[in-house]
Image: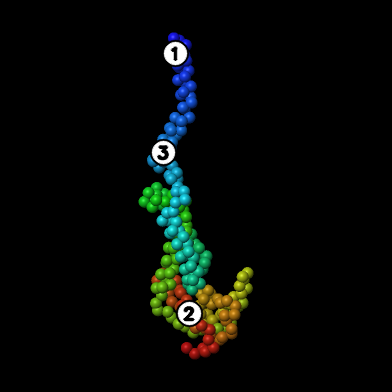
């Protein structure tokens, strides 16, 4: 009788030991699911191989911004350094908002939110402001300036010419007095049309070197 009891106990112990890994796996799985549900594992549901609306916004925003900035920045009295500063500020500002406030509303994971802010949100905001400033200029003022001389500036990739105007015109707008080498061919005057946008940035609409200095 004692032998049977011991044998039964041994069998019970053996069965429990053999099934223990399965029980432990189930408990760990339930524990992880509970932690996930309570938000302790917020990055556990990162979509693998699935597209999201933010992905399209990132791509469209990047190419839209790049194309517009390449066209508008050379015609606006703003340096590329200032543009990069504005892009950095606009991209990092949304990241200061705590992640938990918008995670469920936007459905974005941490990495997606970082890329969305850096590429899909910051650049379009800055680009849109520059575009509005560019389109809101009215009216343009056309002026005729006498060219007093020029300086030849050689860079690593290009050679440029910075012209000097009479009465120190456009003295603070050297960008509008800088042209690629060969554009200026010794004409005595230049006609420039500029205007101020809604955000206070000066925009260059057109310019023309001319041999006639009569306005």
Residue 147 spot, x, y in % from top left = 55, 83
**Can residue 159 be seen from the camera position used here?**
yes
Single out the mark in the foreground, 2 or 1: 1
Q: Residue furthest top?
A: 1
- For the residue pair 2 and 125, the one nearer the viewer reads as 2
Provide the residue designation for mark 3: 33
Spatial CA distance of label 2 from label 1 is 103 Å
Spatial CA distance of label 3 from label 2 is 64 Å
**Earlier-in-chain disc, 3 versus 2:** 3
- Does 176 sit above or below residue 80? below
**Earlier-in-chain disc, 2 versus 1:** 1
- Does 53 sit above or below residue 36? below
Q: How many marks?
A: 3
What residue appears at the point 52 percent right and 65 percent down from the top-left corner?
81
- For the residue pair 110 and 93, the one nearer the viewer reads as 110
Residue 63 spot, x, y in % from top left = 48, 64
Q: Secondary structure at mark 1?
A: helix
- Does 24 sit above or below residue 157? above
Disc 3 crowd rating (10 Å Cα; few below 14, some 14-19, many 20+) is: some
What residue appears at the point 60 percent right and 78 percent down from the top-left corner?
181
Single out the mark in the foreground, 1 or 3: 1
**Can residue 153 be seen from the camera position used here?**
no
Provide the residue designation for mark 1: 5
Q: Residue furthest left?
A: 105
Q: Are marks 3 and 2 in contact (CB under 8 Å)?
A: no
- Does 75 sit above or below residue 117? below
Spatial CA distance of label 1 from label 3 is 40 Å
Q: Find residue 206 and name its label.
A: 2
Single out the mark in the foreground, 3 or 2: 3
């Amino acid at each position: 009788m004692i032998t049977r009891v011991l044998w039964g106990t041994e069998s019970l112990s053996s069965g429990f030991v053999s099934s223990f890994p399965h029980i432990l796996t189930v408990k760990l799985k339930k524990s992880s699911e509970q932690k996930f549900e309570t938000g302790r594992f917020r990055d556990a549901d990162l979509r693998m191989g699935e597209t999201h609306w933010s992905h399209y916004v990132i791509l469209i925003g990047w190419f839209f911004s790049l194309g517009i900035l390449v066209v508008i920045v050379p015609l606006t009295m703003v340096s590329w350094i200032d543009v990069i500063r504005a892009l950095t500020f606009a991209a990092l500002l949304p990241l200061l908002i705590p992640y938990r406030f918008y995670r469920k509303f936007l459905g974005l994971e941490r990495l997606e939110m970082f890329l969305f802010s850096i590429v899909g949100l910051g650049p379009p905001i800055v680009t849109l402001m520059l575009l509005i400033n560019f389109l809101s200029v009215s009216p343009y003022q056309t002026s005729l300036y006498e060219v007093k001389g020029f300086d030849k500036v050689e860079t690593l990739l290009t050679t440029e010419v910075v012209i000097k105007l009479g009465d120190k015109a456009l003295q603070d707008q050297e960008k509008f007095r800088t042209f690629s080498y060969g554009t200026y061919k010794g004409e005595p005057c230049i006609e420039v049309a500029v205007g101020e946008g809604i955000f206070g940035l000066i925009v260059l609409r057109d310019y023309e070197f001319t041999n006639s200095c009569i306005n």
